[in-house]
Amino acid sequence: MSIPGVDATVALSIVAAVGDFSRFSSPNRLVSYLGLNPRVRQSGGQPASHGRITKQGRAHARGMLVEAAWVATKTPGPLRAFFERVRTRRGMQIAVVATARKLACLCWHMITREEDYHFERTSLTAQKLRKLQLRAGMPSREGQKGTAAAYNLKDVRARERAITEQAEQACRKLVADWQEKTPSKEGAAATNGARLSRPSTGQAARQEKAPHPALRSGIDHAHTPA
């Protein structure tokens, strides 16, 4: 519940669907169990193609994660930066599903490590927990200052929002620096001396299969023993 967009209903739905998180050895296995992993099609030596998500497993928990992802994309933080980065390349629908998949991975890491979300808004989490306590039947204690009182202060909410906005900008800068340092596929191939594609027709293809007679004579002359 320390993750933005995840309230008691979403958290209970995920826990009820997954059960013991330790039975999944990696977050990717949890993502596959929830049906949020894309389908992969590959034939022979052809490159693999990725399609829609498999939608296997518990549909209710998957839907709750997608709803939580929509809320997280409107909240300052690294999750919103991730959503907008994917949206510029793949579109809004694919970006929100990718964010839901990111939420599932976060849940696995946080529960297996027994940690809270690193970029949580403390007062907001306290308010979520207090609402859960009231729904469970605890007394309201009107007129008394409780653990969720800080959320009612505008200064506290503004300060926490500013911290999450800084985290979002830091995430954007980190990804931008990483993309600048990572060479493109063409640049990497040229650096490694690899050929990008093999021509199938034309003069270039014929030269690859059989060198020019003048070149062949030069090669034979170079390999003739002295």
Image (cartoon, rainbow, N blue to C red):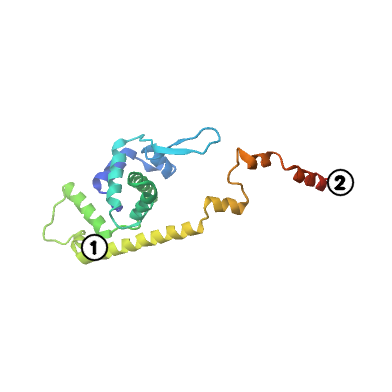
Most foreground residue, 28 or 131 = 28
- Tell me: residue 191, above or below residue 163: above
Query: Considering only order in the chain, which callout, 1 or 2, is on the residue closer to the N terminus?
Result: 1
Outermost residue, right side:
226
Residue 203 figure quarter: top right
| Res. 1 visible in picture | no
- Tell me: residue 21, above or below residue 127: above
Image x and y of residue 13, in percent: 28, 41
Camera-near label (2 vs 1) is 2
Residue 21 figure quarter: top left
Q: What is the spatial separation of the Cα atoms under label 2 and label 1, in whole angstroms?
A: 84 Å
- The residue labelled by disc 1 is 157
| Residue occupying the point 36% across, 49% down | 87
| Residue occupying the point 31% across, 64% down | 163
Question: Type of residue at label 2?
Answer: Pro
Image x and y of residue 220, in percent: 80, 44
| Residue occupying the point 29% across, 40% down | 63
| Res. 199 visible in picture | yes
**Secondary structure of the residue carrying numbered label 2:** loop
Question: Type of residue at label 1?
Answer: Arg
Mark 2 Cα within 10 Å, few/some/many (few <14, many 20+)? few
Residue 225 circle label: 2
**Secondary structure of the residue carrying numbered label 1:** helix
| Residue occupying the point 27% across, 65% down | 159
